[in-house]
Image (cartoon, grey):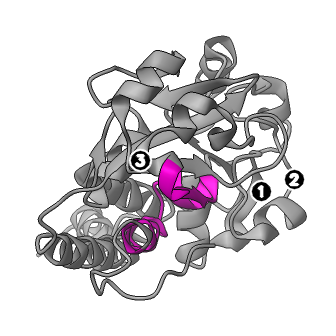
Amino acid sequence: MRTPVAALLLALLAVPASAEPLPTRVVSIGGAITEVLYALGEDKRIAAVDTTSVYPPAALSEKPNVGYMRGLSAEGVLSLSPDLILMEDGAGPKEAVALIDAAGVPVRHVPSGYSVPDLLQKMRLVAAAVGRDEEGEALAQRMAGELEALRGDLAEIKSKRRVLFLLSVADGRANAAGHGTGADAVIRLAGAENVFGDVEGYKMLSPESAAALKPDVILMLDRAGPGGGDPLAIPALAATPAGQAGAVIRMDAAYLLGFGPRTPAALRDLAVRLYPDAGLGASLVR
């Protein structure tokens, strides 16, 4: 015969532990994080974004803004009363990030690597943080399938285009992307060769170096203002195979280098423009 105490204990054990409440006020710091939340249909949870969250456009036009992700104010972020802060690696300054981490609000730091596994893990981590594990896995699997399909299509291409990515062009000088950069990653994933790949990070190019690289294509970000100049105005670049052919490709920065849900489409769009006769599909560059 059970005693009242034993019966009470059995009853308590039979009741499942309550799940941890899901966040309702998420501060999203990093454009890719914001894109994932919108892709999951979780935009109503977003309490604020940073200035790199340019897609979809509603993110910047409808959500409060905490400023540039590398120039955060801890007070500004915390004043929004978030119950979760999702922050892409590279956010700063370090002092502000340390204060945010110490404030007692749940913070998830999201890796921002440039490999395919890094990209898919980002989808899963962001989804899990808002209780959408299954949907995050489905998104990651769909993206993995699209990337694998592109890799298969590119396997048919025998001669790789030689690409020079220029971050900026100003006053006759060009800032080029070497290995360890997002630009290097997208060039390789789109089936091309980075002619500046022996150099690490971003470096300024001398006219002599630019001429010696002999790129087939110059890749740049589509923007106006400083850094958005004409690379072919530099005689050394105009004399390269890319310059002689007028082969300059410009693409939207967040689309090409965002490493978010749109990355498979961005890579295929870049590949289509690099290899227009390869039957890779129609470009949807946006």
Q: Is residue 45 left or right of residue 150?
A: right
**Residue for point 85% across, 41% down:** 225
Dots 2 and 1: beta carbons under 8 Å? Answer: yes
Image quarter (top left, top right, bottom left or bottom right) of the C terminus:
bottom right
- Relative vertical location of residue 110 with respect to residue 40 in this rendering, above or below: above
Label 2 belongs to which residue? 64
Q: Amino acid at mark 1?
A: Ala
Q: Secondary structure at mark 1?
A: strand
Percent of width and height locating residue 279: 29, 87
Which of the marked residues, 2 or 1, is nearer the chain's N terminus? 1
Q: Is residue 279 left or right of residue 211?
A: left
Residue stretch in magenta:
244-272
Find out whether residue 23 is within the magenta segment.
no
Give the label on residue 241, or none.
Answer: 3
Find out whether residue 268 is within the magenta segment.
yes
Label 1 belongs to which residue? 47
Residue 233 makes an appearance in the image: yes
Q: Nearer the viewer, residue 46 or 252?
A: 252
Q: Which dot, 3 or 2, sits closer to the camera?
A: 3
Q: Which dot, 1 or 3, sits closer to the camera?
A: 3
**Residue for point 52% across, 47% down:** 243
Q: What's the distance in space between the residues labelled 2 and 1, CA to CA? A: 7 Å
